[in-house]
Image (spheres, grey):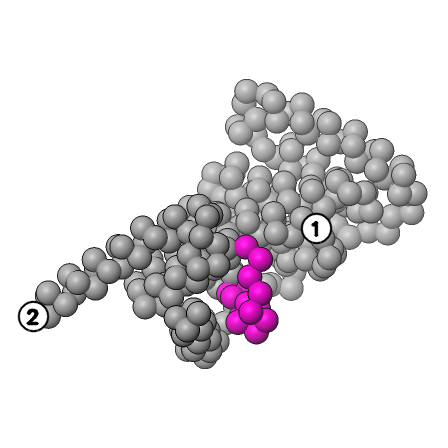
């Protein structure tokens, strides 16, 4: 328990530095381009039941396209249909899922990925649906994109709010965000802080896949530390 407490204290210190010197301030989006062109806020008077029905019709059309062999050759049609659900039927449950799927489409199906459009869409989604039950799923898509691309600075910045919340409340319901944070710090060569993050994951979530990977990372860090000491000697 004492060891875990020390780990949390070190994370507090690191996150304090993060806000002061270790990280560039987040880019303020261009006011004219902070919402993807496909997304248009409009007044919708259609009853919720009708919105749900029509959004399902469009969603089924998307599913048919997704089953085509060359769907990845032209994702524009799918993006257009997701946007129609978002724009025309915002009260339907499928509107929130369309945000999630459109963000995934921008990051996975386009070459090169439309990263700026995806992040603008994410900000618009958060603004429209602040209590959305799909938020974790949406953010996992973005985190995984940064992780797979090795964009460690961006990944660290994206998950840092969750780490700050953990420090403030002591609650950590899932190891995912701390794992991404620790992986980002590890790949940014901040071995000390990543080590502490991995220790917390192993302590709080010992039977998870994240804990298994964390065990291997601790071995790697110990090896790196030994090698550095040998080089100095």
* Nearest to the observer: residue 228 or residue 81: 228
Tell me the distance, in whole angstroms, between the alpha carbons under discs 1 and 2. 54 Å
Name the residue located 81 percent from the left edge and 43 percent from the top edge: 92
Q: Which residue is mark 2?
A: 233
Residue 216 relative to residue 75: left or right? left
Residue 10 relative to residue 41: left or right? left
Q: Secondary structure at mark 2?
A: loop
From this viewpoint, is residue 151 visible?
no
Name the residue located 58 percent from the left edge and 65 percent from the top edge: 171
Q: Which residue is mark 1?
A: 133
Q: Residue furthest top?
A: 69
Say above or below: 2 vs 71.
Answer: below
Which label's residue is closer to the chain start, 1 or 2?
A: 1
Q: Residue furthest left?
A: 233
Name the residue located 37 percent from the left edge and 53 percent from the top edge: 214
Residue 88 relative to residue 98: left or right? right
* Nearest to the observer: residue 144 or residue 71: 144
Quick one: label 1, few (<14), some, or many (20+) residues within 10 Å? few
Predominant secondary structure, magenta span: helix
Q: Secondary structure at mark 1?
A: loop
Q: How many marks?
A: 2
Span highlighted in magenta in the image: 160-174
Quarter residue 217 falls in: bottom left
Q: Where residue 161 appears, x then y in whole percent?
A: 55, 66
Quick one: label 2, few (<14), some, or many (20+) residues within 10 Å? few
* Nearest to the observer: residue 43 or residue 153: 153
Name the residue located 65 percent from the left edge and 52 percent from the top edge: 135
């Amino acid at each position: 328990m004492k060891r875990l407490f020390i780990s949390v204290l070190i994370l507090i210190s690191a996150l304090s530095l993060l806000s002061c010197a270790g990280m560039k301030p987040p880019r303020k989006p261009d006011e004219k381009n902070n919402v993807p062109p496909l997304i248009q806020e409009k007044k919708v008077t259609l009853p919720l039941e009708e919105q749900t029905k029509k959004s399902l019709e469009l969603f089924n059309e998307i599913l048919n396209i997704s089953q085509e062999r060359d769907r990845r050759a032209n994702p524009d049609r799918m993006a257009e249909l997701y946007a129609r659900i978002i724009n025309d039927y915002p009260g339907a449950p499928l509107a929130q899922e369309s945000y999630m799927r459109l963000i995934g489409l921008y990051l996975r199906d386009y070459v090169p990925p439309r990263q700026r459009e995806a992040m603008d869409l994410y900000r618009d989604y958060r603004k429209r649906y602040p209590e959305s039950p799909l938020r974790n799923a949406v953010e996992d898509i973005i985190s995984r994109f940064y992780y797979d691309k090795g964009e460690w600075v961006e990944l660290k910045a994206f998950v840092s709010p969750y780490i700050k919340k953990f420090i403030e409340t002591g609650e950590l319901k899932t190891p995912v965000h701390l794992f991404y944070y620790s992986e980002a710090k590890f790949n940014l060569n901040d071995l000390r802080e990543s080590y502490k993050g991995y220790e917390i994951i192993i302590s709080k979530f010992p039977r998870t896949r994240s804990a298994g990977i964390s065990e291997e990372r601790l071995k790697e860090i110990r090896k790196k530390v030994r090698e550095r000491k040998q080089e100095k000697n």
